[in-house]
Amino acid sequence: MNYAKRLSGIVTFLYSKYPSPKSAGQSLKLPLANSFAVFLFFLVYKPFGLGRQEIYPLVLISFGFAATAFVVIAANALLLFRIIKNLFRQHEWRTYHQVLWLSWQITTVAGAILFYVHTVGQVPITPLNFLRAQTFTLLFAIIPISFGFLSYRNRILEQHSRDRRTAVVHLRGNGSAPNDVVVLQNESGTSETKVPIDALLYVCSADNYVEIWWRKDNRLERALLRNTLRGVQQAVASHPTLVRCHKSYIVNIKNLVSLEGNSMGGKLVLDGVDKKIPVSRRHVARLKGLL
């Protein structure tokens, strides 16, 4: 049972949202920092028999390793990012995407280092040497990559959380504070759905019904009520974080990640929701003003 829980926890973690490395395609800071670390490592620890080299050749060879790492990381961050830009969409990027991206970085850097060693040291390129280069690169990078992986994830997600809290505080200053629970009823008042305000994601129309979507224990839940979206909008008027964004949608901006689009219309990205919520042209300016 414990193994099943652990496996479930690992799967949940891998499928959790991770901030997309979009900035990787906009800056050379990361390749420069990584290549400088490579330079210092080779200069200090002198692997591959570099300890037998004089200081001047050692500096040049270490610089060559650093330049090799810089070229590969920069190519991944700048060129590859632009070629397959659609892979780096913020709302679809998950932790397992980031793991695969870092694995690709390690693999390409290791291959380039093996080629460099082959060029300057006559080391043959064989499957065994490639595996050794992979192992060496992984052992060198595992600690800083793990630290950067977790710290960047926590820092960006905390920033998103602060941004949402700031937006909510702003809204509360312009209206009554929301209650803890949103109560939605059908037209006859014989059936109701209660959802915590923090968990509610959006409400959308579905013919003669409305669909209510919320998050519970990292799962999406749905309820169906016979009502109109106008009726729901009137019922939630006391909750300023529930905002009409389209003729068919009401969203909870507490769970808003980003707003994409322009004055002609757009899409909302909600935390934990793969589906993009449409924003009609008449609501774009007001939503931007709220955020």
Image (cartoon, helix red, strand yellow):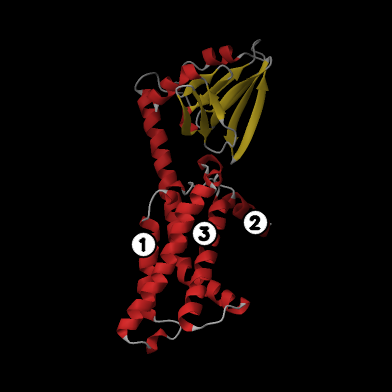
- Dot 3: what SS? helix
Residue 47's x, y, as percent?
43, 81
Instruction: Identify the residue shown where x is 56% and y is 52%.
Output: 97
Q: Amino acid at mark 2?
A: Leu
- Dot 2: what SS? helix
Instruction: Identify the residue shown where x is 38% and y is 23%.
Output: 289
Residue 64's x, y, as percent?
39, 73
The answer to whether one can see residue 282 in this image is yes
The tag earlier along the polypeptide, 3 or 1, is 1
The circle on residue 33 is: 1
Residue 223 position by quadrant? top right
Q: Amino acid at mark 1?
A: Ala
Is label 3 or label 2 in front?
Answer: 3
Dot 2 alpha-carbon crowd within 10 angstroms: few under 14, some 14 to 19, many 20 or more: few
Marks 3 and 1 in Cβ contact (< 8 Å): no
Q: Rounded to the nearest whole Å, what is the CA distance between mark 3 and mark 1?
A: 16 Å
The circle on residue 7 is: 2
In this view, the residue in front, 259 or 56, is 56
Q: Is residue 122 above or below residue 198?
A: below
Q: Amino acid at mark 3?
A: Leu
